[in-house]
Amino acid sequence: MEKPVLVVLAAGLGSRYGGLKQMDPVGGHGQSIIDYSLFDARRAGFQRVIFVITKELEADFRETVGARASRGMEVRYAFQDMADLPKGYHVPFGRQKPWGTTHAVLAARELIDGPFAVINADDCYGPEAFRVIFDYLSHHQDRPDCFQYAMVGYHLRSTVTEHGSVARGVCRLSPDGLLEEIVERTKIEKDGDGGRFTEDGGQTWEHLPGDTLVSMNFWGFQHSFLREAQERFPVFLDRILDENPARGECYLPLLVDDMLRRGRAQVRVLSSADQWYGVTYREDKPSVVQALREKTEAGLYPEDLWGSAAGM
């Protein structure tokens, strides 16, 4: 069985944040959020990372994040290109953004030869999350009748921000911890201990309790996911081109939910006691910097992540 690899989705330009947040330092020695996730991934057992970026980011990304990560991991690059579409499809006039996270994962399809985990570049998931998903991928394989995947879930209260809306995959679980449904909510705001979401531009809102389980795009897939994604992506692409050709996207939760509904996959929801940290907006950065500083002072991270990783 091939060792699991890590796929990092880093092609987004951080339009809400106002810059290339994948490279924005939040720790000493110029370390960005992704450096902490990569450090956690490396000590969990991941040895190879594939960064999904755009060609426009390549030079800067290689010189910063890539150069640091290569001190502790084997680094590969895949490029998300808006024109990378199935045969017979074309980019509609006026579209300026790629086709979402499913499209981003497919950009790395030629570099993935076994099980793989997927994370966002601007989220800090915590060391336990990487341990549990590496362990799952190392000991589980697809069944003949059903694909076997995993997801690390977090409580909504720890993933919303005071500074604007966020998109989250809201999950419903079976009694035995399998994902039954995941619904992508693209506009969730903080509301007391939890959040609230709207689907009609803010005319009406529905409350979500703080302990609602949500996906933070931390997935564990077998290689079968790539074949399924290639097969089903045109179905979503047809819908996007009909409903919102300029901005519509195919999010990973949408494809996973489609597979659940068709009985093609089971998704084990893994829990982690770690706190999730992320930078959706520039105003989120100070709290993340403070949290990582405190973890470093407590000995959970070394001051120089990759100086330590190189000797692992």
Image: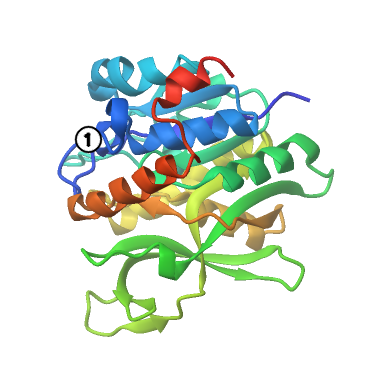
For residue 243, above or below residue 187: above
* Number of numbered labels in the structure image: 1
User: Who is closer to the viewer here, 38 or 115?
Assistant: 38
Horizontal side, residue 135 vs residue 291: left or right: right
Amino acid beneath label 1:
Leu
> Residue beneath label 1, please?
20
Q: Could you tell me which residue is drawn at 59 percent across and 41 percent down?
A: 130
Q: Could you tell me which residue is drawn at 62 percent across and 43 percent down?
A: 220
Indicate the colouring scheme. rainbow
Rendering coords of residue 74 (x, y %): 53, 15
Horizontal side, residue 273 vs residue 244: left or right: right
- The answer to which image quadrant residue 32 occupies is top left
Rendering coords of residue 27 (x, y %): 31, 35
Q: From this viewpoint, is residue 198 visible? A: no
Q: Sort mark 1 into few (<14), some (14-19) or many (20+) by Cα contacts within 10 Å.
A: some
Quadrant (top left, top right, bottom left, bottom right) of the C terminus: top right
Rendering coords of residue 281 (x, y %): 22, 53
Quadrant (top left, top right, bottom left, bottom right) of the N terminus: top right
- The answer to which image quadrant residue 208 occupies is bottom left
Rendering coords of residue 239 (x, y %): 40, 55
Q: Regarding mark 1 in the picture, which secondary structure is present there?
A: loop
Q: From this viewpoint, is residue 11 visible? A: yes
Q: Could you tell me which residue is drawn at 42 percent across and 70 percent down?
A: 157
Q: Could you tell me which residue is drawn at 21 percent across and 63 percent down?
A: 163
Horizontal side, residue 163 vs residue 217: left or right: left
- The answer to which image quadrant residue 168 occupies is bottom left
